[in-house]
Image (tube, grey):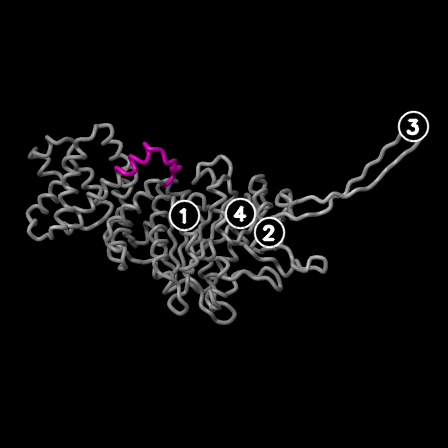
Amino acid sequence: MPKDPILDRVILQLSTHDVVRFRDIIEGGCLITGGLGSGKSSTSARNIALSLLSSDYNGLPPYGGLVLTVKSDETEHWIEYAKKTGREKDLIVFNAASGLSFDPLAYLWHSGGRAAAQIETIVELFTILMSVGKVYQPSSGERYFEQAVEELMRATLVILSNAGEDISITAIHKVIASLPIDRQEIDDANWQQSSECARIISKLRQRKDEFTPSQWDDLEIAIVFLLEKFPALDNRTRSNIESTWSGMASKFTYDPFRSMFCSGIFDFTPEQTTHERKIVIVDMPVLEYGRETSRLCQILVKLIFQRAWLRHQYKPGCCHGGFCFQDEFALLMHRHEAHFHMVCRSSAIAPICILPNILNMAAEEFGEQQPGAKTLGFLGLLSLKIFHANNETLTNQYASDQIGKTYTYIEGWNAGHSEHQHHSGVSANKQLVHLLEPITFTSLLKPDGDNPYAEAVVYLSGRTFNATITRSNPRGLPYLRVHFSR
């Protein structure tokens, strides 16, 4: 991208002559790792957050973005950052007590653009949500049930949308929960009177003349599936399909989540982060709300924001870019995360991903006992990496491998003796060794009660650092040791 004041804003000053700019972070994102007490959240991540929220020294305005929460004090910290930078008026704290609602389907249905009111967009959204917390192993059996639930959602959305009903998670759930269990039940008067599915289909048949031939063809396919094909399935198969859906959706049928996510309104939008610099905090910490429920709700919001951000291509003067800040990132990933990081640059969105070590991500999202192709492939998308002190060996090995190797001479010494003489000698062998050995990351400085600094190793894709240039190494090194303050 050409020079641009928003993209070229300095986010981190690493040395007198080395900086990290906003454009560096939007190229795939930023990874911050470090063991417990290493200072990753309280130093480098905090410095990035404050810089994103602050106007720069030239008076350029700050950024807006989305903040997801895992730790109980995360929201409190961001409120403190907003006060420190004069951004209190830009805060939107979304939780059960806020009185705010963000209905994702209402937003998708009315947001405009070519993908608005598209049934397949909603089907894909829920397919991703149903995979949250599950390692995706594309076996034939798993794919069958996934496709079966997609077909069920698709048919339900077709009848709801054509009937003019509100599109919400609860509306979809009511239809699915009221489907006939067999073909005989369709003629039962009690089912016809009590079933939400029966009510909507009756309404559609009474209005048949209002639909175009194409619309009625769609409706006939959907109705045949809901009233004939689905009830004809084996009881166990049908119940497995229903439970796959309800295991995710039933959480939203009760308050406070029904009011927060199924009201039919959206009190804030993703566009407010990029065009009005709003800071949206999803205040539903995993450690308070429960692991699966909190993850599901936060990833739901994140998916909507990511999709909206990518729909808008950044152009100088049209918007301000934005950020997505995620501490304990391994708990907030979803199946299509890599795709967002591949293309977020074109929308000027900076993802900040913080986690203790890469094993968390490998096990949580990719089901790999050790970081394999999926984990390493994802990490390769993130251009900026900040490694704090760590005692996890595979993360330290990854950091060393990322920084790279060089040829150097390794000295050797030998000595011996025979019956008539002693001999000794010195030799040197040229070997390929790490520029920074893995053990280095175990001894980086940590902050404590007396010391406010955390030491980290910074790597930026394709960059060598001016502060490392010496007469013997005029090109500099591809890493820089930096002290970040609390």
Q: Earlier in the sequence, mark 2 or mark 3?
A: 3
Question: Label 4 neighbourhood size at 10 Å, few (<14), some (14-19), many (20+)?
Answer: many
Instruction: Read off the residue under disc 1.
Output: 337
SS class of the residue under badge 4? strand
Question: Label 1 neighbourhood size at 10 Å, few (<14), some (14-19), many (20+)?
Answer: some
* 228 sits to left or right of 280: left
- The answer to whether the residue labelled 2 contacts the one labelled 3, judged by CB atoms less than 8 Å apart, is no
- Between label 1 and label 4, give the one nearer the viewer: 1
Q: Earlier in the sequence, mark 1 or mark 4?
A: 4
Q: Earlier in the sequence, mark 2 or mark 4?
A: 4
Q: Position of residue 440 (x, y in %)?
A: 64, 45
* 372 sits to left or right of 270: right
In the image, what residue type sits under mark 4? Thr
Instruction: Read off the residue under disc 2.
Output: 457
**Tag on residue 33?**
4
Between 451 and 410, the one lying in front of the other is 410
Marks 2 and 4, how far apart in space? 10 Å
Marks 1 and 4, how far apart in space? 18 Å
Quarter of the view holding residue 200:
top left
Marks 2 and 3, how far apart in space? 53 Å
Marks 4 and 3, how far apart in space? 58 Å
Q: Residue furthest right?
A: 420
Marks 1 and 3, how far apart in space? 70 Å
Q: Earlier in the sequence, mark 1 or mark 3?
A: 1
Q: Is residue 343 above or below residue 393?
A: below
Between 143 and 368, the one lying in front of the other is 143
